[in-house]
Image (cartoon, rainbow, N blue to C red):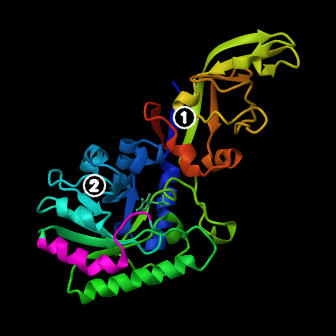
Amino acid sequence: MATIKLSKKNFYHNLNQITLQTGSVEKIAIVLKDNAYGHGLVEMARLACEYGITKAVVGTTQEAEAISAFFTEVVVLGDTPKVEGGFTYVLNALEAIASVPFGVKVELKVDTGMHRNGIELHQLEEALFHIQERGLLLQGVMTHYRSADVLSSEFFWQQKRFEVVKQRVKEAGVEGVRFHSHNSASILRTHHFSEDFVRVGIGAYGYSELPPLFNVVKLKPVLSLWAKRMATRHLKKGQRVGYGGDFIAPKDMVVSTYDVGYGDGLMRGLFEGNFLTPSGHHLLGRISMDFVTFEGEEEEVCLFENAQEVAEVLGTISYEVLTQLHPSVKREVVEE
Ligand SMILES: *Cc1c(COP(=O)(O)O)cnc(C)c1O
């Protein structure tokens, strides 16, 4: 089986950088949805806990249950609210309030321009009223930015709208709630952070999709993907490798197969012409479900240590390359 190595040092480096932006570790909620962006839910939860982070954000109740021991609070972004577990559920629509059981902790999401989830601005007072009427425990009011990673005024426009939300919540007489709007891109470009916490995902894992101009904070990728040698053979010039025989040996050569493939999440769009491993190996022939072939006979090969480079080749973003990595791939925390 392939192995995913998780660099504790790099993760803590990134968290140090984010702490500098927020002012304190208490103001960080680590986003662990989608198997911690492919890194491994429980492994990353444990490391975040050791670092001193007390809040986590996940997608589902199942994820929340798996990591609840590590945090004092877990916010669930998109699942059916229930009292058991004591988690905090995000309300994504006005209609959702009616079916939330009494006594559940909730976070009200307001749509300030992304037009994906959250109540609309004109529904704010109505939502606050229903939340109180149903006996739900409102913890906070939140929003999500659509263009925090784009060089434009849109981000500021949305921030202003959220300031209006804060004002209106106060005017409605609702007290003691927290406000949070920042994700990785927005906290990395913010200089005077004043909200209650950030919901940081991709930045903690070592990536920023911000334009280079904004990238003053240096982050380090946490994850690298490795595979072990399975078999080695001596090819004669002209012999072919793999499905379709795409690779034709240009000379007599030694090649080995390694135990990683698209079944593990190594995207099949990579091939000899567009991809090189960190140690300079070209893929020979197609990526199979569980195997790849490289020249040589090293015991272990690193497939990639920077998902953004892989993403660029494939015309996608680091998030997609990372979340493709299958949960069954072994995760190993390394100190370095
Ligand atoms: C995924 C998510 C985040 C984290 O975003 P990053 O860009 O990975 O930092 C924050 N808030 C919400 C609501 C999200 O869904």
Image quadrant of ligand 1 equals bottom left
Amino acid, disc 2? Phe
Q: Secondary structure at mark 2?
A: loop
Residue ID at (18%, 71%): 131
Q: Secondary structure at mark 1?
A: loop
Specify whether residue 144 is in view: yes
Q: Amino acid at mark 1?
A: Gly
| Residue 288, picture quadrant | top right
Cα distance in 3D space between marks 1 and 2: 29 Å
Residue 279 location (% of width, % of height): 72, 36
Which mark is drawn over residue 265?
1
Q: Is residue 43 above or below residue 263?
A: below
Q: Is mark 1 within 8 Å of ligand 1?
A: no
- The image shows residue 60 at horizontal and vertical percentages of 31, 49
Asked whether 53 or 134 is in front, the reply is: 134
Instruction: Give the x, y percent position of residue 314.
Output: 67, 44
| Disc 2 residue crowd, few under 14, some 14–19, many 20+, Cα 10 Å | some
Q: Residue at x 25, y 49 (%)?
A: 68
Q: Is residue 286 above or below residue 186?
A: above
Name the side, left or right, on which 143 lies relative to 232: left
Q: How many marks?
A: 2
Name which quarter of the figure residue 275 lies in: top right
Residue bearing the label numbered 2? 71
Q: Is residue 122 magenta?
A: yes
Q: Nearer the viewer, mark 1 or mark 2?
A: 1
* Span colored in magenta: 116-133
